[in-house]
Amino acid sequence: MFKKLFCAVLCLSMIFVCGCTNSKQIDKAALAETVTVSEANGKLIYTFYLLSGEDKPQGVSVTANSFREACTLAKEKYIPDLRLEKFELLVVNEKIYSRVLKNDLKYMSEESFFSPLSYVTLCDENTIKIFEEDKNAPEQIEEYILLLKNKNDAVNINSLSVYNSFAENKDDEIYISYFNSDEELKVSYIKIIL
Amino acid sequence: MHTKIKFPSKRLMLSLFICSSLVILLLNFNEASNISFTFNVFCILSGLAITFLFFVPSAIIKKRTNLDFMSFAHLKTPSAIVFISAFYSIYFVWTAEYFLLGYTDMFVKKLNSEANIYVVALILLAVCSYAAHKGLNAVTRCGIFIFAFSLIAFILIFSGNISNLDFKHYGFEFSGNYNNFIENTSYFMTTSFIAVIFACVSVYIKDFKTKHTAVTLGFIALLFIITMLFVWFALGSYGNSQEYSFFTLSKSSHLGVVNGIDCFYLSVSTLSVFLILSIILCCISKSTGKSGSLNIILLFSLIIFILYICSNQFNFVKEIMTNHYYFNAFSFAAAVLVPTVYLFVFGRKSYV
């Protein structure tokens, strides 16, 4: 009798007090898997590619000064249910990496919803355009990054290793993957200096 | 409801091991930049060596009389037992607050920032009250399964981080100063609360040997050192950017195609906090002299919950409750000071 009464009180307490009322349901959440960073008219543009069942990639572009600001603006104005727990890939235009990479990785390291294993890569302008047209581009890029890592262990591929290289490398030089797509998508690595 | 059956000493030690793992699971202090990994290992070993000394008075009482300190005090000073009971009850309420506040903070920061922490605490306390009502024997039996699950979780988290280990950037040099030593050693010394639990409930265990304590503390040290090794060499500077290094460690684990197994971390933390709160409620009912009394358990659960609300409403209360220096001083008084006074006052001859 006591057990039944105890269980009933426990269940009722959970129903009435509703500890997780504010939780976002998975079917409503806008899950961003990839973010590309490019430049237009001297301003930084962060494009959030959301998981969807559509054939075309669902990208939402936000003009901001940093990834932190872009995430805040996106949640406030454009994607209220934005969730970054499934974030996997940050693609930065090679021309602007010195402006954004260090700060953006610092932001990613401070927020617990970002996985330390999210891939970080640089690319040319054509590769950024591929993301707007091809839904499978992130998957392809991740495969290429893994192949590159298998060939050359010195290349930093994820936010954990790139951030640590920034923080610890005394020479201020690190190797990071780089994509170009003049004719077809090609992966290599470049040495960047901070 | 509460059984007086004695159970093996190893089982209690297994549960105490799980309870101690919360100290490293809720590890939440920022490393000073001048501290090295080796220095931290030294602090861990120092903290646990002191914890071992905390076991000595109650282990002597157990060896000589086959009683725990609380039963010994009930026997020797029945007129003063109300003060001893009150002192230990306050200590255990503090311990419950220390870990409950740590757990709910982690829950809000890492799992759901919009969760109602009072509901989380209330449900947790309700479940723990029921477990405590069932008695220490049942709770420690449950501890075996929690240990098995935790072992799998720890193995998965560590093995998933092996490929992240990088010994190039950080060496094994020994660097740190006196203040760092005091700060870190006192943090790892918070495991000494297990000595107070032992002092309170060791009458229920049989076949106790001193080496059980040493082996348990050895395994706790091993767990802490392995965790530090991975936090240091697998996470590097990234690990210092966030609170709860073990959470980041679980998030950076990758096993085949699976990236990030933080759900294991959250499960182990929840199970460990359930175990510790249940054992603490058992200890409270034992120290009041009414083992397994549902009324006593519910009354103290309510006190813990009210104090929990106060801690969250008034920041200075929370600061006191989560200050590990005060907590260690209280543990010292409960595990060493009071039992030693009894040992001196009631000499060897009066045991028989």
Image: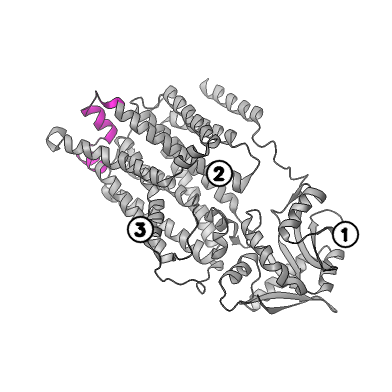
Q: Position of residue B31 (x, y in %)?
A: 48, 59
| Mark toward the viewer: 2 or 1 | 2
Instruction: Kindly give the residue lying farthest to the left in the view shown.
Output: B349
Observer able to see residue B231: yes
Residue that mark 3 sits on = B45
Q: Which residues are magenta?
A: B58-82
Amino acid type shown at disc 2? Asp
Of all chains, the one bearing label 3 is B
Image-quadrant location for residue B350: top left
Amino acid type shown at disc 3? Leu
Amino acid type shown at disc 1? Lys
Residue that mark 2 sits on = B105
Which element type, helix, strand or loop, lies under badge 1?
loop
Q: Position of residue B188 (x, y in %)?
A: 40, 52
Observer able to see residue B138: no
B237 within the magenta span: no
Residue at left offset 34%, top offset 43%:
B329
| Mark toward the viewer: 2 or 3 | 2
Residue that mark 1 sits on = A56
Q: Nearer the viewer, residue B98 or B298?
A: B98
